[in-house]
Image: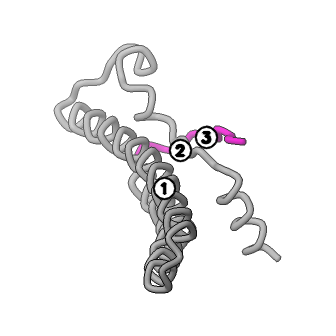
Amino acid sequence: MKVTISYGVDLEDLPKTLGELLGNLKENDVPGVLNDIQDAILYSNENNMSEALGAIDRARLQLAKIDNRLMEYGGILSGYAKVDSDLKMGIVPANPQETMPENAFEAKEIIDDQASASDTSESE
């Protein structure tokens, strides 16, 4: 099950917040992909093709989740860059919520079961 978490941050804090989200992605999700790839190598060397294919599939699914998050984070940074540029040029919209990208003011993170489980295990 996926859950969307939205929260507001001050515009000047957005790069730091995204840095933290990227750090969480690196610490919590990338190691799982590396483990699945390592498992695929070991199973392949042992001539256990069905297990190797399973490990490859798990790695691909996790990479797709990582890709989705990176696309989201890239969109947020793109919105931030536009707003920051406009503000430096003195362009301040009358109603920022209507004229600026939604993700320029909001950081969103999709949490899946695995990430929730890793967060729970870290707090124990």
Disc 2: CA contacts within 10 A as few (<14), some (14-19) or many (>=20): few
Find the residue positioned furthest to the left.
89
Residue shown at 23% from the left, 25% from the top: 91
Residue shown at 48% from the left, 74% from the top: 40
Q: Circles 2 and 3: CB distance less than 8 Å?
A: yes
Residue 110 among those drawn in magenta: no
Relative height, residue 48 to residue 113 (above, below) = below
Amino acid under disc 3: Tyr
Quickly name the residue at label 3.
7
Relative height, residue 42 to residue 77 (above, below) = below
Residue shown at 57% from the left, 39% from the top: 8
Quickly name the residue at label 2.
9
In three-dimensional space, the C-alpha distance between marks 2 and 3, rounded to whole angstroms, equals 7 Å
Residue 104 spot, x, y in % from top left: 40, 34
Amino acid under disc 1: Thr
Relative height, residue 76 to residue 70 (above, below) = above
SS state under label 3: strand
Residue 62 spot, x, y in % from top left: 51, 57
Residue 19 spot, x, y in % from top left: 43, 61
Quickly name the residue at label 1.
17
Of mark 1 and mark 2, the one earlier in the sequence is: 2
